[in-house]
């Protein structure tokens, strides 16, 4: 993948740029919440916090910002990518799933991942020559 100006963009960066283009004000916590729910459908907020290596409050805020407008407990901006549901056995426990819009976004990210453009550092010889040129 190549950006305007000929700069390379690996798969990870392309995924982050996609999320930023769709939601310019998205937070890192919201990105992590979305990606972890995509990989772990039905995850509980408490488990999500552990996966994100953050507090329960932060995981809760991030996931609630990804709910659909009008959903119970939604926080602005209500991106519509997640659904929060109880499993029926535990009324208080809430599980997170992707909505149709979330599934479409996950599929777009999967498409980028399939392209598998790894993070590529400049070849060592180039780095050495750049250091040498700077020392002159």
Image (cartoon, grey):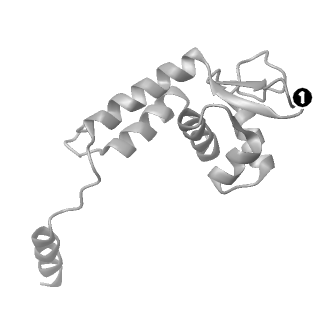
Q: Quadrant of residue 73?
A: top right
Position of residue 91 in the picture relative to residue 107 (left or right): right
| Placement of 59 over or under 42, stated as above or below | below
In percent of width and height, residue 112 lies at 33, 33
Looking at the image, which is closer to me, 100 or 124? 100
| Placement of 83 over or under 94, stated as above or below | above
Q: Secondary structure at mark 1?
A: loop
The C terminus is located in which quarter?
Answer: bottom left
Q: Which residue is mark 1?
A: 91
> Which residue: 12% across, 68% down?
126
The N terminus is located in which quarter?
Answer: top left
In percent of width and height, residue 51 lies at 63, 51
Question: How many numbered callouts?
Answer: 1
Looking at the image, which is closer to me, 108 or 28? 108
In percent of width and height, residue 70 lies at 79, 15
Q: Quadrant of residue 121?
A: bottom left
> Which residue: 80% across, 47% down?
57
> Which residue: 77% across, 24% down?
85
**Hey, which residue is sitting farthest right in the picture?**
91
The crowd level at tag 1 (other Cα within 10 Å; few <14, some 14-19, many 20+) is few
| Placement of 89 over or under 62, stated as above or below | above
Q: Quadrant of residue 55?
A: bottom right
> Which residue: 59% across, 35% down?
34
Position of residue 80 in the picture relative to residue 102 (left or right): right
């Amino acid at each position: 993948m190549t950006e305007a100006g000929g700069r390379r963009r690996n798969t990870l960066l392309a995924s982050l740029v996609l999320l930023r283009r769709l939601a310019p004000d998205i937070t890192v916590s919201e990105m992590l919440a979305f990606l972890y729910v995509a990989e772990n459908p039905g995850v509980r907020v408490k488990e999500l916090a552990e996966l994100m290596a953050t507090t329960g409050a932060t995981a809760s805020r991030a996931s609630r910002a990804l709910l659909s407008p009008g959903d119970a407990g939604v926080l602005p901006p209500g991106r519509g990518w997640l659904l929060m549901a109880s499993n029926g056995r535990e009324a208080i426990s809430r599980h997170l799933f992707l909505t149709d819009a979330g599934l479409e976004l996950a599929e777009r990210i999967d498409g980028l991942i399939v392209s598998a453009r790894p993070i590529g550092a400049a070849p060592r010889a180039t780095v050495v020559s750049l250091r040498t040129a700077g020392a002159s």
